[in-house]
Image (cartoon, grey):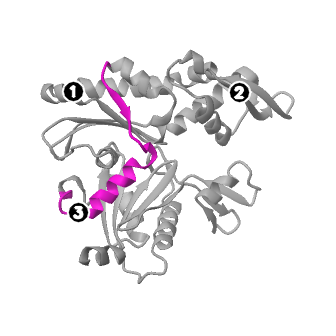
Amino acid sequence: MAFSVANVFSNDIGIDLGTANTLVYVRGRGIVINEPTVVATDTRTGRVVAMGGEAKEMLGREPPDLKVIRPLRDGVINDFEYTEEMIRYFIRRVLKNRFFVRPKVVVCVPSGITPVEKRAVRDAAERAGAKDVRLIAEPMAAAIGCSLPVEEPVGSMIIDIGGGTSEIAIISLSGIVTKVSIRVGGDEMDEAIIQPLRKTYNLLIGPRMAESIKIHIGSAFPVFDEEKEMPVKGLDLVGATPRMVMVNSEEIREALSESVNAIIAAVRLALEKTPEELAADIIDRGIVMSGGGALLRGLDQRVRVETNLPVRLDDDCMTCVVRGTGKVLDNLNGYEKMLETLKD
């Protein structure tokens, strides 16, 4: 009963501050927010007029007096002011109707960011109202969320592909033994789709249409009985009029090949840097993939073929990282070694 009452009144929050989406976990309540990391502002006053899903709906459709901003890029803060506004909005939203006590917050960050970038994340959370801010590396949080035995003396390999970064890590005894972090993710894939359509069809499309193409017919590995096509709508660069063309999955797979190859190269590099004993564990245990980018059709097959290792997708790739923060919040003392508190 004491534990239940503590959870009811808990203000502890876990935040997966992603380039594409922000997820918020509240201890005792689970995942309460899963929204795009997008902010819409009034260009005349600088005032924020919408956040999250509402702001994303405006992307590419906004009039001159509105500006839609994605305040994070490549997994790190690109616009400090609006990131702080967004974190404050989400914290107040999840703690409304409660006695406001400044919460403990665990924030996930890419493993490859600099100390300056880490401080920017911490400062944004503190200014937004957090009392005690701890940082955890995204691949570690993802591994915890996927229920990998991160505290045991065995090697666990995780590939976490987000909107701005791909994180590959081998974890053992509560630490990251080997890590490779590259700034290639879902956003890079979207951009890779936009450019060939412009060159081949003289068709200009926006990031929302590119994302839709990636989701519906994008692939990383040829599965010939599943080749698809879809209509793509955009602006004709020659006639300056709206136009539609049919695009097939083979074209999109070719467009995505550079991004996919970069991820494969990072996986190979991580394996090359792995100590022999842990390499033996990975042969037995395989690789786990998480993050929204891991859902690209055939990417798990491509990794399996390229590494000759067992590969599986987590049951809920999109929420692995924030679920990991939830488990950390439930046992802060147990996971203390995996958390980072920055000192000024």
Q: State which mark lies toward you, 1 or 2.
A: 1
**284 sits left or right of 72 in the view:** left
Quick one: label 1 or label 2, which is nearer the N terminus?
2
Instruction: Report the amino acid beneath label 2.
Output: Arg
Instruction: Report the amino acid beneath label 3.
Output: Leu
Given the current orientation, which residue lies at the most extreme bottom position? Answer: 99
Q: State which mark lies toward you, 1 or 3.
A: 1
Q: State which mark lies toward you, 2 or 3.
A: 3
Mark 1 vs mark 2, CA separation in Å:
45 Å
Q: In the image, is residue 31 part of the stretch drawn in magenta? A: no
Whether tag 1 and tag 3 are in contact, CB under 8 A, the answer is: no
Q: x and y percent of residue 200 in the render? A: 71, 20
Q: x and y percent of residue 86 in the render? A: 51, 63
x 24%, y 23%: residue: 272
In the picture of the structure, the residue carrying the numbered disc 2 is 198
Mark 2 vs mark 3, CA separation in Å:
50 Å
Q: Which mark is residue 115?
A: none
Image quadrant in which the N terminus is located: bottom left
Q: In the image, is residue 309 part of the stretch drawn in magenta? A: yes
Mark 1 is surrounded, within 10 Å at the Cα level, by few (under 14), some (14 to 19) or many (20 or more) other residues, namely: few
Residue 287, placed above or below residue 99: above
Tag 2, which secondary structure? Answer: helix
Q: Which residues are magenta?
A: 308-336
